[in-house]
Amino acid sequence: MDEYRVRVTKDYLVFCAAHFITFDKDQCERLHGHNYRVAAELTGPLNESHLVYDFIALKRMLRDIVNHLDHRMLVPLKNPLLEVEERGAAIRIASCKKEWSLPREDCVLLEIENTTAERLASWIAGRLREELARAGLPSPQRLRIDVEETHGQSAVYETTG
């Protein structure tokens, strides 16, 4: 059976962001940042133009998604070890005997459990699916998102349907 897929990875599909992760039920990493790189691979049938997806539209969607994360503090809202609250123009985060107060405009509040590369890849995949649907494009048969947080260190999220 024939299979078609497109892959997009460009120098501008990057974002710089601060984060920390929690682990072992009571530990927090130090606040730090990465220069993340994103790649997407989509599998599906050819359309009437003999394309799986138009590269130009796909690149624009991915660029918009990563630009939303660029130069921000990534805050996971579903992490049971974090207390996150909005206080006027600030976000207060508390966990592991630490507390941060950050400008709201510098934060991206994400509906994920932890800001690991794995969960960021899943979040990006969800956003890309939303953007494809908004553009009236079919959902891919398979969608793979790679998030590299540093050279040689990446996570992959892949989903079907």
Image (spheres, rainbow, N blue to C red):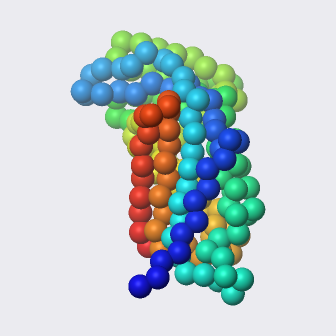
Image quadrant in which the N terminus is located: bottom left
Total number of numbered discs in the rendering:
0
In which quarter of the view is residue 13 placed?
top right
Reply above or below: 157 against 30.
below
Name the spot of residue 150 as percent of width and height, x first.
50, 30
State the residue at coordinates (51%, 19%): 32
Quadrant occupied by the C terminus = bottom left
Residue 25 in view: yes
On screen, residue 108 versus residue 25, left or right, reads right
Query: Which residue extends farthest front?
Result: 2
Please give left or right for residue 128 compared with residue 155 in the image.
right
Name the one closer to the observer, 42 or 116: 42
- The answer to which of 14 and 94 lies nearer the viewer is 14
User: In the image, 95: left or right of 77?
Assistant: left
The residue positioned 50% from the left and 43% from the top of the image is 147
Indicate the quadrant where residue 132 lies. Answer: bottom right
Residue at (54% x, 65% y) in the render: 42
- Please, is residue 45 above or below residue 41 in the view? below
Going by the picture, which residue comes out furthest to the left?
24
Is residue 126 something one can see in this rendering?
no
Of residues 84 and 66, the one drawn nearer to the viewer in this rendering: 66
